[in-house]
Image (cartoon, helix red, strand yellow):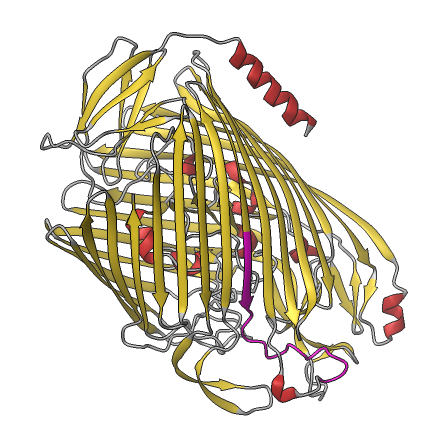
Amino acid sequence: MTKLTLISSAIFSVLCSHSALAATVNGKVTDEKNQPIENATIHVHGKSQSVKTNKLGEFAIELDASGQLHISKDNYSDSRITVTESSNNIAIALKPTSIETVVVFASALHKSSLEMISPVNVLSGDELRNKSKPTLGETLKGLPGVNASYFGPVSSSPIIRGLDGPRVKIMQNGLDSSDASRIGPDHATSSDSLAAEQIEVLRGPSTLLYGSGAIGGVVNVVDNRIPTSNINELTGAVEYSHDSVSNANTYAAKLETGYNNFNFHFDGTKRSGDDYQTPRFNQLHEDGDVESKDSVENTFIDSETVNFGTSYVGEHLTVGFSYGKIKTDYGIPGDEHSHAHDEEPVADEDEKIPVYAHLEQDRWQGLLSYALHNNWIETINLRLGYTDYSHSEIENGEIGTTFKNKTTEARLNIEHKFANWHGMIGYHYSDSDYDANGEEAFTPASITTTNALYLLEEREFGDVTVELGARVEDYKIKSQIAAQQHSHDDTQTSNAEVLDYTKSFTNLSASMGAIWQYTSGYSMAISLSHSERAPLSAELLSNGLHIATGTYELGLGYHIEDGEAHFEPENIKQETSTNIDLGFRRFSGDFGYSVNFFYNDIKNFYFQENTGLVFDEEHGLEAADNGHDHGVAVYQFTSKDAELYGLEFDAHYKVNASTLVKVFGDSTRAKLKQDDENLPRIPANKLGSELQYTLGNNWQFALTATHYFSQRDITAYETKTDGYTLFDAQANYQLDLGNLDTQLYINVDNITDELGFVHSSFIKDTAPLPGRNFRFGIRGYF
């Protein structure tokens, strides 16, 4: 932290020594028909603050040196114009796009989704609010190339192009969410989609800026908890909704205000719901009995979040901080093995108390940004974060196991110009202190520290923009490991030697790409990237029973011999990914599309493989055909070369001023290269269509059909999953209540009450998707 203090002092020193005279630049933003565009964003390139156009499309912005204005508006092509202090009465005309476009926060270089070389989707505005679910996975699973791990609707993480967990970075405002969702699928993400301004999904490797944990993609939840633009009046929003399938009620509120360059933000949500209902299905128990069910037990949720933030936004300086608190209780479904490891049965097995999770998180974030108007350095931006996360699993009313993770993170970016190149050089620091205590602490305590330097540069060559980048990352993990565990003689476990284990890796990543606007309204993008990733503590050090998934997990560092697991971490190699992406886009006129093809060659791909062994407390590890009635399957992390390839697409056609048709889909193939075996739990392909219709100024309707194909490409220890089709509908009505912008809505999910099982779920056979759900809601803005 001493280094960060010195950096902060240097920035403030520059601030105190700087003075300049500002001039006001006025202008107007219109569309192709010369009609004013309201709420377009005007941003001075290299500065942190921005302004919005009024109802007449007019704006006024302070400028103290020659520079470039960046004008953006959702669903319009961005515009960039050069201005000086004497510029005035500027007229800007924006061209509409046929596909959605929005500025991507995670791009780091103020790019819109159409300008990105890497494929990206952004959910924002009413679309995000209509599709928002309690978990990120369920909120995003309808996007092309995105699916969900689905441990019930209360714990569901995004899967991007077949990759999830430690390969998909979940972030909030560019900093790691720092929860325990990468440890296991039953651990919910702590990011809250209900309070988000927008959610960005970057498909393909994004390791250069965000580290080796982004080898498969990035999900960035953007909020305004640290305001970066001045707020001149009191604004806010409130929302209430009810879901019939789980009898869930959700309340959300947001307030923002500001005075004399000081800004304040508050938001909070509360959600409570019961076990969710399903179409009737048959569940096979371990004893061979078949039970007919129409709900999934132990899927309740009770969650509260509160967030405060404040900032000062000056001509050059922006400084602010925020604090957020999350408290959530949620059921862990599929608890078939919850007492398999108990030495004594519960008093009354007919009254077994389900295991549930209690999650708490305290999160502090800080921002310091300073804009310098010289020929080289544009902005210096420092983001700080500290997260204190705790996840306790409650068994029979008492805490059974507690997982804790305390993370300190800092990211320093220097945006610059050099000759005709525009880019960013940065430093990234992360320290994660993970601990687990209890019967299910299958991963030992560890400290993981990362230090990284990265460089990202872009340059325009006519209609072609070229982007180059590189990152070097020092990754170190420390832990204490029992040298021998779970032999047939329990006394050996208690007397096992404890080893102080430290392992360091140097991860190198590089990328190159280009986007070519070969004619008006059309572009082609291609990128090649090389990424390296070291194993997480769970992948390397796990050794224990994971009750939620009903498995015994062993890490890469263990060797099994004669029913004993020995810690022998030899020849641990990094996971190395070489990825190529090719994309085609059309974004003008009534017809638009985005089609992406990808191929990912991964050496030393880490995955869990069934060892053919089972584990119980009495006999330890032994062959599955030992004749014992109890025991859970033993899965061990291993590494083999793999390849993943596929495509994703979405196309939009505007039939007329009130009707829009969309078609979307994705396909992913994932297999081992050596023996052509399939990788486990790869999501099924999907194909969908959506019809949007606007009636007058007040009514909006949408009907969506999504078909999930059967998944037959499975491992020897998986079962096939049948295909299914989901139909969803929504209707919104806009109320005219003066200064209060109010919207009534009703969503009907799974209209036909279709029974669907998620192939990527660890508990797919016991937790099908929810049945028909009516969601009623009202939201208001002022």
Farthest bottom residue?
A: 289
Point 44% across, 46% down: residue: 267
Residue 682 in the image: state x and y as whole percent.
47, 64
Magenta residues: mostly which secondary structure? loop
- Please give the name of the residue rendered at 36% of the width and 68% of the height, measured from the top-left corner: 243
Which quadrant of the rendered structure holds the N terminus? top right
Image position of 52 with respect to 752: above or below: above
In the picture provided, is 433 more to the left or to the right than 41? right
* Count of numbered badges drawn on the protein: 0
Quadrant position of residue 728 = bottom left
Image coords of residue 639 (percent x, y): 62, 57
Q: Nearer the viewer, residue 649 or 285?
A: 285
Looking at the picture, how far across and down is residue 477, in whole percent?
71, 46
Asked whether 305 or 668 is in front, the reply is 305
Residues in magenta, as a range: 326-345
| Residue at the image position 89 percent from the left and 72 percent from the top | 491
Q: Quadrant of residue 408?
A: top right
- Could you say which is closer to the camera, residue 337 or residue 270? 270
Q: Is residue 63 above or below residue 495?
A: above
**Which quarter of the figure is the C terminus placed in?**
top left
Residue 292, how many percent across, how many down?
Answer: 45, 88
Q: Relative to residue 672, is residue 525 depicted above or below?
A: above
Does the segment drawn in magenta span residue 504? no
340 within the magenta span:
yes
Viewed as shown, does residue 540 lie left or right of 365?
right
- Answer yes or no: is residue 431 visible: yes
> Please, is residue 164 above or below residue 626 in the view?
above
Q: Does residue 605 show up? A: no
